[in-house]
Amino acid sequence: MIGQPYDLAGKRVYVAGHRGMVGSAIVRRVGLEGCEVLTASRAELDLKNQAAVRAWFAANRPDAVFLAAAKVGGILANDSFPADFLYDNLIIEANIIEAAHVQDVEKLLFLGSSCIYPKFAPQPITEDALLTGPLEPTNEWYAIAKIAGIKLAQAYRRQHGRDFISAMPTNLYGPGDNYDLAGGHVLPALIRKAHEAKLAGAAAIEIWGTGTPRREFLHVDDLADACVFLMRRYSGESHVNAGSGEDIAIADLAQLVCDVVGFEGAIQRDTSKPDGTPRKLMSGDKLAGMGWQPRIGLREGIAGAYRDFLDQSVTKRGL
Ligand code: GFB
């Protein structure tokens, strides 16, 4: 349902997780709305500490909250650290949603993830596929935490009349991504592998799994725009998918990244690594029906992400 537009101008808007890829994109985008953007560094506020979160909300009194703080990672990180992915995400979202309720926050947007859906959900995945089948085992811990976050937002809506909503982004990429090969997602990993192979004059790069899984990718600046759109225009119990509407096989993605980076060698597969969900394409009909569309194409987005990777490399080496 599209509610009365919620005007962010003049509001105090807290972006939780502002150092991350998603949070920093939301800070950039929401800054255009004429609001006062509030952030808190990890040193200032431990989001896993309930008393600290409550005190921060009482002292800073935000009107609106974007809940983008989360422990995130790629398929291997999810599979290797199930306790961290479940506990950290549960506690962070519970603390923030509860504090937002106690402090009468007018509107809150919780960010989930497309891995909340069943492993074999019919494609493209509509919002009502939630909780209709078993999850993908490599990331069920993260998925369960994110499902709990959606349910928390719904529960505070039902029991306390709070205007708390949820957006479900597909796989994201863009400036501020994590280029760590073990912990990060596929797209930043491919950028790094192709770049380093080009510099080293290597004959090939290696990708994980069979290369056949299909994923949908959305540029984080498009996601930030969708979040602000939903914050302003949407009020409803159901979460809303945010995607690009197109998916690509991982092997084809690897080729595209190599083209953009300028690496001309071969692409080899390490099938000892997991594939994860065979396909994850979300239906964007609900958000499109409200009038929102993504703007950044995949090739253009990867070219921008590669520039960001080069900038990060320069900064890290202190050049
Ligand atoms: O991006 P990724 O880790 O996330 O992996 P998921 C996507 C696909 O790319 C998998 C393959 O089939 C990987 O096996 N892949 C190929 C690689 N080469 C690489 C590589 O070098 N690094 C990585 N990371 N993957 C995550 C979830 O799942 O997606 C999270 O675990 C979250 O919970 C996130 O939902 C959006 O799409 O498989």
Image (cartoon, helix red, strand yellow):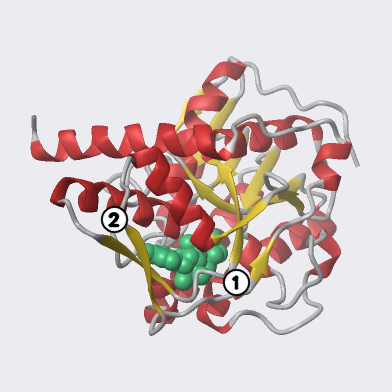
Q: Is residue 175 visible?
A: no
Pick the residue in front: 174 or 34: 174
**Observer-nearest residue: 270 or 235?**
270
Give how far across and how far down residue 116 sits, in percent.
66, 68
Quadrant in which the N terminus is drawn = top right
280 shown above or below 27: below
Task: Relative to 62, say whether 71 is above or below.
Answer: below
Label 2, label 1: how many angstroms apart (C-alpha)?
28 Å
Quarter occupied by residue 205: bottom left
Q: Earlier in the sequence, mark 2 or mark 1?
A: 1
The image's mark for residue 143 is: 1
Q: Going by the image, does 294 lie left or right of 196?
A: right
Image point 38% across, 48% down: which residue? Answer: 258
Q: Residues within 10 Å of mark 2 (few under 14, many from 20)?
A: many
Judge: label 1 CB < 8 Å from ligand 1: yes
In the image, taking residue 268 as reference, residue 228 lies left or right, namely right
Q: Is mark 2 within 8 Å of ligand 1?
A: yes
Residue 279 visible in the shown view: yes
Helix, strand or loop under label 2: helix
Name the amino acid, label 2: Lys
Q: Is residue 63 above or below residue 101?
A: above
Q: Position of residue 88 (x, y in %)?
A: 44, 68
Q: Which residue bears the numbered disc 2? A: 193
Q: In which image quadrant can residue 108 be found?
A: top right
Q: Residue 286: x percent and y percent?
A: 85, 46
Q: Residue at x 77, y 44 (%)?
A: 163
Q: Secondary structure at mark 1?
A: helix
Q: Locate residue 242 relative to residue 302 in the image: left or right.
A: right
